[in-house]
Amino acid sequence: MTGILPIKKYGTHSALNMFDEYSMLGSRGIEKYIGFTDDEVRVLCQEYDVSFENMKAWYDGYQLNGAELYCPRSVIKAIDSQSFGGYWTETETYEALAKYIALNFDGLHDTIEELLSGQPQPVVTRTFTNDMVTFESKDDILTLLIHLGYLGYNSDDRTVYIPNKEIADEFVISMEATGLWKETIGAVMQSRKLLEDTLRCDSESVAKAIEEIHDSNSSVINYNNEQSLRFIILIAYYYAKEHYDIVQEMPAGKGFADIMFIPKPKTNTEKYPPMVVELKWDYSAETAIRQIKERNYSEKLQSFEKVLLVGISYKKVIKDNKKHECIIEEYKIQKK
């Protein structure tokens, strides 16, 4: 028997309880038959002269029993067309996802935004009744999205995440369709210009954009803290994921860098150099830049020629009609 969902639960037992179930929550050793593995995709990319790095960014991300899995349809379509896009999601319209994320159980909207920013979220899967109509909580929706392939699941810490760019783009389209995430979608749409302004070291434009996004996306309760600012930065730099791996709280030098943007393999680092971002609440942007230098956060970036140091601060007291400040400096890596 095959299908997307596990056997439907009725009461405390499944109607068919003599079967072994293999699902996205427990593959029981057959994960290599569910999708293409990392090694298989690498061989295909070599054979058909397709970028493995791009293939990985677009279609990798599912993990079962330690195996990395890719959607076979997307991989095949990308090889056939010699271009990358949302091929698996072409088999259904965006409404299929939109109707589920529009159900705002237990703050589901906030959870989706956190997922879009790249932060895994906890999930309880055992309450899900294994159908597509019975939902009692946010966890039921998230569990369904795991089975449908819209979310990845990490069984070690029981968290969900958006697995790759193909799915992330589908979430953005679906969020836009619901009309419930206007501020977040606005931030995502502005993210290309924000990255360009950052790479040009246009501190004024970056500070203004961050302030607008922060004002639009944070509640009064959560506005005045560094975690809120961190979330806003991750959403604001959504487009940067095209070119960077974004790592939070990365051990570096004499501490932990708040956010580090590390260029993906084969990225033009002259155009997209690594970036170290330090966030400060109620301190100055100058303090943030000084901390990056004093604690030598750029130590992890010895293989690059230069790095952009980005200090972003938020102050409760308005100064010169501005609550947010930004300083961007180009810094030459000191080789050991």
Image (cartoon, rainbow, N blue to C red):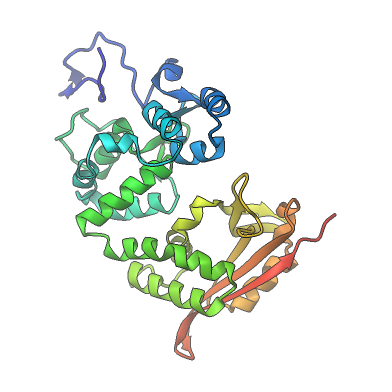
Q: Is residue 219 above or below residue 60?
A: below
Looking at the image, residue 10 sits to the left or right of residue 226; the answer is: left
Say which residue appears at 60% left-offset and 68% top-offset: 310
Say which residue appears at 32% left-offset and 52% top-offset: 172
Q: Is residue 236 above or below residue 316?
A: above
Quadrant assignment for the N terminus: top left
Looking at the image, residue 198 sits to the left or right of residue 108; the answer is: right
Q: Is residue 108 visible?
A: no
Quadrant housing residue 151 = top left
In depth, the one of 106 and 66 nearer the eye is 66
In depth, the one of 305 and 221 nearer the eye is 305
Say which residue appears at 69% left-offset and 73% top-offset: 290
Residue 100 percent coordinates (x, y): 21, 44
Q: Is residue 148 above or below residue 223?
A: above
Residue 51 percent coordinates (x, y): 55, 37
Q: Is residue 191 above or below residue 2?
A: below
Looking at the image, residue 285 sits to the left or right of residue 100; the answer is: right
Q: Is residue 20 visible?
A: yes
Q: In this view, which residue lies farthest toward the top?
A: 18
Residue 207 percent coordinates (x, y): 50, 76
Residue 265 percent coordinates (x, y): 62, 44
Say which residue appears at 49% left-offset and 52% top-offset: 241
Quadrant assignment for the C terminus: bottom right
Give the tally of numbered discs: 0
